[in-house]
Amino acid sequence: MYKAVFIDVDGTLIRKDHSISAATFDVIQKLKEKNILVVLVSARPLSGIIPIAKKVNLADNPIASLNGAYIAYNGEIIFNSVIDIEAVTNVYDQLQKYDATIIYYQQENWFSELENAGTAHEQKITHIPVTIQPFDAIIALWKKNKTGPNKILVIASEKTTNEIQHVMKQKFINELNIATSKPTYLDVMNKQASKLNAIRLLMQKYNIQQHETIAIGDNFNDKEMIEFAGCGVAMGNAPDAVKEAANYVTDTNNNDGVCKAIKKLMNF
């Protein structure tokens, strides 16, 4: 019997137009009625997840944002993992040779050095305005507060993103968790921050066993949690490598893939 379902947001729960189907809404309510823990696990910041959580009556459940680097539950911070300032500076220096937009997420605030198409796209899903200021000013603020970002988002062309990922994984293999959330988005977090670690933490908190979990996702930042879960589900729109890691491949996000997977696995 499954006791928890962990669901990615973009490319998984929501359709291409960011809507949620009535069928998907209904199946999530059935899970809640059966007292099954349902957790949204997303690369988005918390402010970009809450409106979606409200649409499916999950705002009172734990939410794992920023790829698991920041987990909150009814205003309580369950987990908050930040990147060391020295590592942030090293990442910044490494990226200067590339045509890329760098965005820094810290809890519900976010920062960038410039406004462009990348920040404009993120602003559409993040209700807190971006803070635009030079990198040195951003770092000075974090040094003063003895903190750092939960996630660095690098936006570039697909070719450049692949190149950056290859170089960064070699250079920061022991320091950072690095994965794509879509072909042009590279997410950089502390080594302790991942969707998999978020699931493990919440399993411990709610006394849930590995075989009692379902994880559903569509991209490489979901791959670890899909491999780990009692039943890992890949969306029909997922890359082949993610599908190969799954126990079950469902339909696409535009064709009720989450709903179909849950109905099959839960015998609804």
Image (spheres, rainbow, N blue to C red):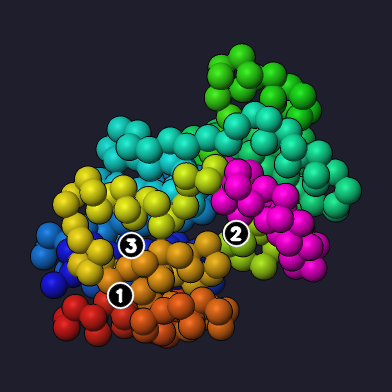
Q: Under tag 3, what secondary structure?
A: strand
Give the farthest residue toward the left: 34
Q: CA distance from mark 2 to mark 1?
A: 22 Å
Is residue 37 found inside the magenta-colored segment of the image?
Answer: no
Q: Secondary structure at mark 2?
A: strand
Q: CA distance from mark 1 to mark 3?
A: 11 Å
70 or 178, nearer to the observer: 178
Taking depth in this image into account, of 193 and 114 the one nearest to the observer is 193
* Residue 231 tag number: 1
Look at the image and give the residue range highlighted in magenta: 151-178
Q: Which image quarter holds the N terminus?
A: bottom left
Task: Please give left or right for residue 124 compared with residue 32 in the image.
Answer: right
Task: From the image, tell me which residue sits under label 3.
Answer: 6
Asked whether 73 or 140 is in front, the reply is 140
**Which circle, 1 or 3, is nearer the viewer?**
1
Q: CA distance from mark 3 to mark 2?
A: 18 Å
The amino acid pointed to by label 2 is Ala
Q: Please tell me which of labels 2 and 1 falls first in the chain.
A: 2
Crowding near pointer 2: few (<14 within 10 Å), some, many (20+)?
many
Q: Is residue 104 left or right of residue 257?
A: right
Near mark 1 (Cα within 10 A), the count class, few <14, some 14-19 or many ≥20, is many
Rendering quarter of residue 83 = top right
Q: Quadrant of the C terminus?
A: bottom left
Residue at the spot of label 2 = 179
Question: What's the residue at 30%, 33% (across, down)?
Answer: 76
Residue 22 percent coordinates (x, y): 31, 73
Residue 97 screen position, x and y as percent: 88, 48
